[in-house]
Image (cartoon, rainbow, N blue to C red):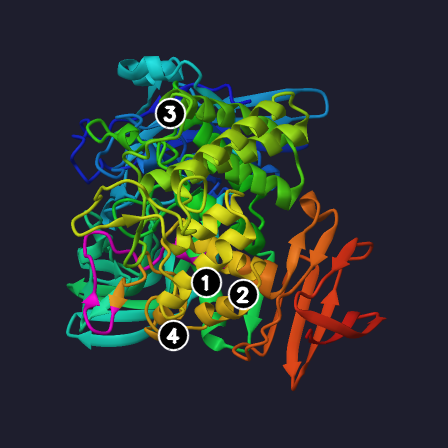
Amino acid sequence: MLNALWIGYETGPVRDRRDLHSNPSPYFRKAFTLMELPKKATLTVSAIGVYKAYLNGSAVGEDYLSPGWTDFHRRIPCVAYDVTALLQKRNAIGVILADGWAAGFLFLSRNCYSDRIWLAAELRLEYADRTEYIRTDKSWKAHDGAIRRSDLYAGEYIDARLSLGDFSAVDYDDSAWEPVESAQGPLKLWQESAKNCWNMRLEPAIAPPTVVKHRLQPTLLLRDGSRAVYDFGQNFTGVLRCTLRGERGATVTFRHAEIMDGDRLYTENLRKAEATDTYILAGGGDETFRPLFTFHGFRYAEITVDGKAEVSDLVGECMYSDLAQTGDFTCSDEVVSKVFRNALWSNRDNFLNVPTDCPQRSERLGYLGDAQIFCKSAMYNMDCDLFFRKYLADIRDAQYGNGAMPAVAPLPHVGSFDFAGWSVAAGWAEAIMVIPYTHYRMYGDPRVLIDNLPAAKRLLDYYDREAGGGLRSGEREFGDWLSVGVTTEHSLLANLYYAYGAYLTAEMCRIVRDPEERYYRALFSRIRRDFRDRYWRGGRLQSDGRLDGNVAKQYFEGDVPSGDTQTAYALAYRFGLLTADEARDNLVRKVEEADRHLTTGFLGVKYLLPVLCDLGRSDLAYAILTNRTYPGWGYSVVNGATTVWERWNSYTQEGGVSEKSMNSFNHYSLGSCVEWMYEYCLGIKPKTSGFGSVRIAPYLDRTGRITSASGHYRSYAVSWRREGDRFFCDVSLPKGANAEFDFPGMTVTDRAEDDSGIHFILECSK
């Protein structure tokens, strides 16, 4: 484990919490000579801030923004690199540091975890007969350089006239550099917040690093004198890279936006995020522009030149956690296929160390509700094992002492904003049950349940105290966020998730053989009984068979909350509080009332299509999925979306861009239909945890809206097509796979196997 002195270097006074901009980045350097080369060399680096490390003139690793985002009051990640091949007899280590999440502006304030940034590094040298260390200490030197400020929201400002050159080269002259500051230990870094640091610890980084995963070539959209606007054809998260050549002092400004408003960038939805990078040329030859310590969410880039300079070799570098893609989907309906690709891009763009809500505006927080709704879609799309293990640690760190959960993790310490006021929001707090249970189902490792079960129990204990042994009140909830035209009553949602949390906790106890399983089974049964007594009008007291919000209350102006909604019936059935017979007619009625469109928000959208299929109405699921009109997934696609929008009406043909202050064009939450594409359209679903056995049960589209579909999860591949009255389905399985087959509503008329897989011919059942 890293056992080095924390060092720092002041490049300016402590920034006010309201200041969007940072001080110049400090550069650190250490030269050393080895008598012999080691068998193995490992450089371990950490920071309160973010860093980029170099050794002998070469970047160490391909990562950016390491060590990532965490609650630095609780844990500080360390990243290890094998640098054996980079070492020589004479060496130099160089590191650049920036504010990042620790001290940079985050949501409403800067200095959320520290008002200074610090570095710790250790080079472990393993020889045949001994081990030696080179660590950060008072012998290191520091200086400021070309990066004059660097912020996640504001962007990066680089003055190449102040470049330090190749400062990690062995023969670099550092005689003008200054001694570093030092701290005796991390607790000293936060004297004002020492009470929050009782369990702070250094530990190896869990999540895969943030790297460049794709590079996009732009097209020139327009040129107006010294201003040019480029279209990358894809909304994405990352930065620009280009070559600049021009006179000394010429300034090139790079601005970023998701959409255009006529011939100008539309930036009104970015809030405080300036999303602007600046580069001042040193002059004298080709210069490479590539910011190190920021990222933007954008499709369009505006480049403005002040002075004499030329821009060439422009590319967009797409950055996200280094997660391998594990699944894919396509079908005969190109709009539906594009819905999948848009959701995959939003998945990528918002999985940058933490599953964030959006990558562009001055928010970019790890909302628990968004993450739990989309987590299974994400786990089909990409290998998210370690990514979600890390995020679950963030959630546990964010849990309050009384068991309540805030809406976001990692939890920013932002002073005046009361995240606690939005704690225990239904569908957000229960991420501590939903994500571990889903992770176990997908990856099969019960340790994730063991790690998170205590936090799940504490949350349910909090609910029990809050509810006085009854039902929850549902105050200060987000509700079915951004639903369309209807609002599902908040207390009803709160108790649906209360029951679901109890059920999942009981399941987690069962799997790990925790003796409290019986208690949580009983808790679920009690909540189910009380829920039906209060909300189900087909119960003991009333007889018209509908859910009733039973609370005369408005949440927003013009809002009329109700229990009679698509979301309420879908969740009540899926969470085990209504039977299939009780839910079916009501859900179908609500879909038909909406002219076969959805009205769900963030919480309901995940469940609508699966529940319709489970209730025998896959025809309605396909009708909703293939709609091109508002509201629905297809509407954004036909209006040019390349990622999933935050709102169903983020843009409308009649009104243009909707709400300016909260309107992201890159949110994954409403893309949770991806889970349905894998599990229902393709029919790939784990029967036992970790795909120890699998159930292949595609719901083939008998309506004719989709005539073929194909895709895979890892080595499980399904392809089906319709020809006349018959369907042909081909299945490929990994060697030795244990598979069960089912084709709801279909009759198998022929089955054959060969080296390419298993082949079925099917007809519709009568």
Per the image, the residue denoted by label 3 is 467
- The residue nearer to you, when weighing 201 against 244, is 201
Q: Nearer the viewer, residue 249 or 374?
A: 374
| Whether label 1 touches label 2, CB < 8 Å | yes
What residue sits right under mark 4 in the picture?
Answer: 628
Identified by mark 4, the residue type is Arg
Contact flag, marks 3 and 1 (Cβ < 8 Å): no
Q: Which residue range is magenta in the image?
A: 652-673
**Residue drawn at x 53%, y 32% as measured from the top left:** 524
Q: Nearer the viewer, mark 2 or mark 4?
A: 2
**Sequence-first disc among 2 and 4:** 2
Q: Residues within 10 Å of mark 2 (few under 14, many from 20)?
A: some
Q: x, y percentage for residue 636?
A: 35, 68
In the foreground, 377 or 189: 377
> Sequence-wise, which precedes: disc 3 or disc 1?
3
Q: Is residue 406 magenta?
A: no
| CA distance for labels 3 and 4 | 43 Å
Image position of 63 with respect to 188: above or below: below
Q: Earlier in the sequence, mark 1 or mark 4?
A: 1
Residue located beneath label 1 in the image: 588
The alpha-carbon separation of the residues under discs 1 and 2 comes to 8 Å
Q: Amino acid at mark 3?
A: Ala
Closer to us: 203 or 359 = 359
Q: Position of residue 654 (x, y in %)?
A: 20, 73
Q: Earlier in the sequence, mark 3 or mark 4?
A: 3
Left or right of 76, for residue 24: left
Look at label 2 and name its amino acid: Arg
Q: x, y percentage for residue 253?
A: 21, 58
Residue 617 numbered mark, or none? 2
Q: Amino acid at mark 1?
A: Val
Q: Secondary structure under badge 1?
A: helix
